Amino acid sequence: MPRVHAKARQRHAGRGPFPSPANLAEALEQVFTTHHGALAAVNVALRQQPIPLPDGTLAVPVPPPATPPRARSRRPSARAPAGPL
């Protein structure tokens, strides 16, 4: 059995291993609010239907690859002071 701090044991005494409905609702609200964009993208992807091709096979939509962040230029900055010529 894992070691549990005495105060944590008192907090959860009589409630079982699951959080209270109020705490669960709060946690779910935070997850859904924080990750709304990602959840919406998943819902859109799941609703897309395969497209029948002339040869009878089905094509499924594929999202474009993620765009990598732009690399910083290695050339000297235009704002950098010019050295002696």
Image (tube, grey):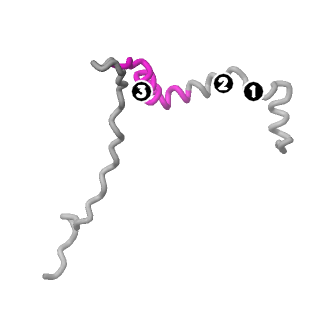
Q: Amino acid at mark 3?
A: Ala
Q: Position of residue 85 (x, y in %)?
A: 13, 82
Q: Circle 1 sits on which residue? A: 18
Mark whose residue sits in front, 3 or 2: 3
Is 38 magenta? The answer is yes
Q: Is residue 79 left or right of residue 11?
A: left
Q: Residue at x 33, y 43 (%)?
A: 67
Q: Position of residue 35 (x, y in %)?
A: 48, 30
Determine contact: label 1, label 2, CB under 8 Å. Answer: yes
Q: Position of residue 12 (x, y in %)?
A: 81, 30
Q: Circle 3 sits on which residue? A: 41
Instruction: Say above or below: 73 vs 3.
Output: below
Instruction: Say above or below: 75 vs 38.
Output: below
Q: Quadrant of the N terminus?
A: top right
Determine contact: label 3, label 1, CB under 8 Å. Answer: no
Q: Earlier in the sequence, mark 3 or mark 2?
A: 2
Instruction: State which quadrant residue 30 falls in.
Output: top right
Q: Residues within 10 Å of mark 2 (few under 14, many from 20)?
A: few
